[in-house]
Amino acid sequence: MEKQAAIKLIQETFQNPFEKGRFGLFLKELFNHIEETPLTVYRGNLIPDAYKPYVSTLDRIGKYQDGDGNKIDLLVVHLKKKTSLERARTMQRNFIAWYLNGSRGGEMKDAALAAFVSPDGDDWRFSLVKMDYRFEEGKSGKVKIKEEFTPA
C-alpha cells in the first residue's frame, strides 16, 4: 500500500465513529494475511457474570498467526455503557484475558487486538492485550507460572 493511501486509511479508521468494515480493512492491511473467521463468539448468557454489566457482545473478525506461531485474535467488543469505554480499562483487559485463557473452547491465544466500542459507536478504543508468562518461586519453594497481561 502506498504511504498516502495508508495514511488515509488510518485517519478514516481512527478519526471516525467505529465501522466494522473499515476496521476489518485496516486489520487486513496491518497484517500480511489474516484468516477471516467472522463469528459472534459471546453474547447474553455466554458472557461471564462479572462482565455482563459492561459487555454486550464479543465478535471475532479473524485470526492471525505470526511466523513464530503466536496466535492473535482480532476482536470487536460492544460495550453496554458509554462510560465503560473510559472508566473500565482494567475490566476490558481482564475480559480479553479471560477470552485468551481458553474461555469456552479451551484454546489458548497469545494476544488479541480488540476494538472496544461504545453503545452509540461514536467513541471506541483500539487495544492490544498480550499474555506473558514468567516463572515465580512461591513461599514453599515451588516454582509456579505467573500470568501477566499488558497494562490496562
Image: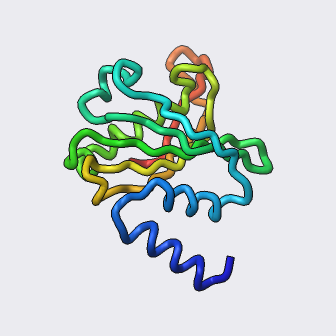
Question: Eyeballing the image, is 2 above or below 107?
Answer: below
Compare residues 19 and 114 and report the one nearer the observer: 19
Specify how the rendered protein is coloured.
rainbow
> Which residue shows up at 50% across the image and 51% down it?
128
Question: Eyeballing the image, is 33 above or below 97?
Answer: below
> Which residue shows up at 62% across the image and 35% down it?
109
Question: Eyeballing the image, is 122 above or below 149?
Answer: below
Residue 132, percent from left and from top? 58, 40
Q: Number of callouts in the render?
A: 0
Position of the N terminus by quadrant: bottom right
> Which residue shows up at 50% across the image and 45% down it?
129
> Which residue shows up at 36% across the image and 18% down it?
45
Question: Eyeballing the image, is 69 above or below 44?
Answer: below
Horizontal arrangement in the rendering, residue 69 relative to residue 152 (left or right): right
Looking at this rendering, what residue extends furthest in the top direction?
140
Horizontal arrangement in the rendering, residue 52 relative to residue 97 (left or right): left
Compare residues 37 and 7 and report the one nearer the observer: 37
Horizontal arrangement in the rendering, residue 10 relative to residue 51 (left or right): right
Compare residues 148 and 91 and report the one nearer the observer: 91
Residue 74, percent from left and from top? 56, 46
Residue 125, percent from left and from top? 37, 56
Horizontal arrangement in the rendering, residue 143 relative to residue 98 (left or right): right
Compare residues 45 and 86 and report the one nearer the observer: 45
Looking at this rendering, what residue extends furthest in the right direction?
67
